[in-house]
Each structure stands twice: as structure tokens, then as C-alpha cells.
Image (tube, grey):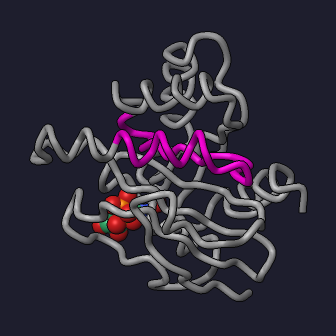
Amino acid sequence: MKAEYIKSAVYEKDYPDTDLPEIAFVGRSNVGKSSMINTLVNRKKLVKVSQKPGKTRTINFFNINDELIFVDLPGYGYAKVSKKDRELWKVMIETYLTKRSQLKAVVLIIDIRVGPTNDDKLMYEWFMAYNVPTIVAFTKCDKLSNNKIQKQLAIIKKEFGDGLGDYVLFSSVTRRGKDELWGIIKEKASL
Ligand code: GDP
């Protein structure tokens, strides 16, 4: 599989000029987003793992097999980010979500042990409001027993209230859920 960094952008004018379908990845800092993208494309470091939390403040575009584009959205929820940076982040994400017509779905990454944070819930509500199909990927599943995972899921489903929609149990360590997530991504991208 070909997986290639295209470019980074903050403003719409800097987005890559392509009309391939896009799948975006988002989650709080340190949730395992870089690891998930690397796992999906069988690379160790297409996306840098464990940069300083909150450091990636750009939208990063990756060409996957000349068929689709993975979009790495900057993480959120890092306490030490200033109010001004938070506002910039919001405008950056909102612009991408509302203006990028080839966006087919967002993968919202949540730590299975932690469940959705307030920021995750706000993100989810945004996606619903903007009609962006959302796939919830629960990561770090290798850290819990299957029994514990089912218990967590039951609690989390209640938190999502009116339906969680598409979701996958994932681990970048065991690669659990990789094929399943790819299946949903391809379906959303009409591949
Ligand atoms: P990002 O900030 O969301 O891009 O998160 P990273 O991919 O950099 O991962 C943050 C930390 O969590 C790193 O130490 C990873 O090795 C670890 N990590 C990521 N995914 C998993 C996973 O599925 N299982 C376990 N056990 N650790 C993970």
C-alpha cells in the first residue's frame, strides 16, 4: 500500500488540490491517533508518534494509494494550550468540516478506558450538526480484558444517548479492529 505525506495546511487555500475522497481522524492529544493511522497503513512512522502533546497545530494530508486521502486533524484537550490557540484550532477544524466537500467521514478516536471526554462529546455534536458521518474508534483495547471492554462499552453507549452509530474496538498494539475499520472507511469513501 502506498501511503505518502502530501502537505500540511492551516488555511483553506493551502489544502491540497485533489478531489479524492477524504477520511479525517480526530481525538484528544495522546489518544493514539498517530498510532492508529500508522497501523492502518502498515507504517511505523508515517505519522510521528508521541510528539509533544498538543504540538501538531496543522491539518496534515496523506495520499493513500492514490485512492483516498487520510486527514490528520490536530488533537485537542491539551491543558497547556492558550485560549487564543484554542480559538485558532476551532476555526481551523470548523473551516475544514464545513468547506471540504470531499470529506466522507470522520474517525473520532476515544480511549476505551477513559470513554468520551467533554471535548469528545462536543466534537461528536459538531459532526452531527454538520452532517459529517462519524465512525467512533475505541482505541487501546489491548489494555483491558474483553469482559472489561464490554462493561465500558455499556457505560459509553449510555453516554452517547441516542445511538453511537458506527463504532470499532481497536488496538494499535494487537491490530485488533484494523480490518473492520478499513471496511467502514472504504464503505464511507465509496471504494
Ligand atoms: P496521538 O497523540 O493521538 O497521535 O497519540 P500517539 O499515537 O502518539 O500515542 C500516544 C501514546 O499511546 C504512545 O505512547 C503510544 O505508544 C500509545 N498508544 C497508542 N495507541 C495504543 C494502543 O492501541 N495500545 C496501547 N497500549 N498504547 C497505545
Tell me where residue 112 appears, x and y as whole percent. Answer: 46, 40
Question: Does the segment drawn in magenta span residue 51?
Answer: no
Q: From this view, report whether residue 85 is shown above or below residue 134.
A: below
Q: Is residue 78 left or right of residue 2?
A: left
Residue closest to the eye, 147 or 62: 62
Residue found at x 30% / y 64% = 56
Tell me where residue 105 appears, x and y as whole percent. Answer: 69, 46
Residue found at x 82% / y 56% = 189
Task: Tell me which segment is drawn in magenta.
Answer: 90-114
Q: How many marks?
A: 0
Residue closest to the eye, 171 or 84: 84
Quadrant location of the C terminus in the rendered image: bottom right
Q: Is residue 123 left or right of residue 183?
A: left
Tell me where residue 181 appears, x and y as whole percent. Answer: 71, 55
Q: Quadrant of ligand 1?
A: bottom left
Residue closest to the eye, 98 or 148: 98
Question: Does the segment drawn in magenta span residue 106?
Answer: yes
Tell me where residue 93 appears, x and y as whole percent. Answer: 44, 45
Residue found at x 55% / y 66% = 15
Q: From this view, report whether residue 157 is shown above or below residue 135.
A: above
Asked if one can make out residue 172 in the rendered structure from this viewpoint, the answer is no
